Amino acid sequence: MDQEKPEDWTCPVRQSTCPFYEDYLRLKEELKSVSRLVETDTLTNLYNYNHLREALQREMERTRRTGQPTGLIMADLDHFKMVNDLHGHQAGNVVLQTVSALWKKNLRLTDIPCRYGGEEFTFVLPGTTLSRAVRTAERLRALLERTPIAINGQEIKITASFGVEVYRMKDVFPLDEFLSRADAFLLEAKRKGRNRVCCRGGEGGRGTPTELEREERESLLIKR
């Protein structure tokens, strides 16, 4: 066959031209597809809740091992029920897909965007301080605020609220508490009027710089 075989491949019938190699390649690709389905939310093409927990646990362990902090952002679309009520659930799905694509292409390759459930999203930011995580959340908030979404021939404005927390080497709280802390800041953003970022020590604020730092710009993956 023309395609170069992997080093660990051995023909089960020990032929130089293996009749089973094409089946091996097909099954390998099918396995990849199944793996993507297991860890991906089919509507938004973001990672799902199960993958979120696995990834977050892994990054928290990395923080304990290396000392590099892990940032966590919780985001929730504001007044999303009104979108479904006024425009229908299919329009709501379009909003979720559009917002997901917008945010996904404005994150670093190393960041892990997930759909937490419903209209709520979670972003795991490896090696990220609180201040940089707040900058990322504010950038995503501002991007959405100034990007109208076309629904049934009209453009509608969607905003989101954000809660930000960080896990550091000295922290000892478990994964569920990490999520709960970020979610508490998200609820605080909702209480304060929505379309804002809240974090430890107060509100991120719309004055927070949203320009990409050089390192962030170089690590953006525009097409995933």
Image (cartoon, grey):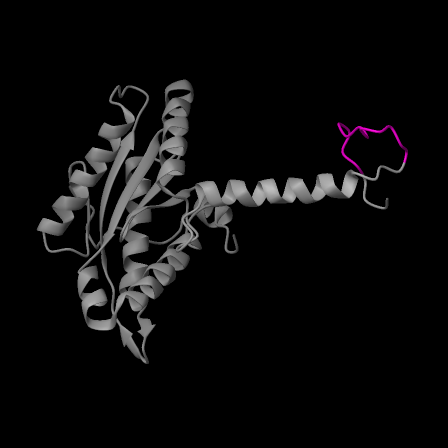
- Residue 162 point in image, percent of width and height: 23, 48
Residue 109 in sight in this render: no
Q: Which residues are magenta?
A: 5-16
In magenta stretch: residue 14: yes
- Residue lying at 18% horizontally and 36% vertically, measured from the top left: 200
- Residue lying at 89% horizontally and 38% vertically, measured from the top left: 17
Question: Quadrant of the rendered structure where residue 198 is?
Answer: top left
As drawn, 143 above or below 115: below
- Residue 66 point in image, percent of width and height: 42, 21
Q: Residue furthest bottom?
A: 153
- Residue 213 point in image, percent of width and height: 41, 47
Q: Residue furthest right?
A: 16
Q: Is residue 25 left or right of residue 38?
A: right
Quarter of the picture containing the N terminus is top right
- Residue 81 point in image, percent of width and height: 19, 61
Residue 54 in sight in this render: yes
Q: Is residue 113 left or right of residue 223?
A: left
Q: Nearer the viewer, residue 101 or 37?
A: 37
Question: Quadrant of the rendered structure where residue 153 is?
Answer: bottom left
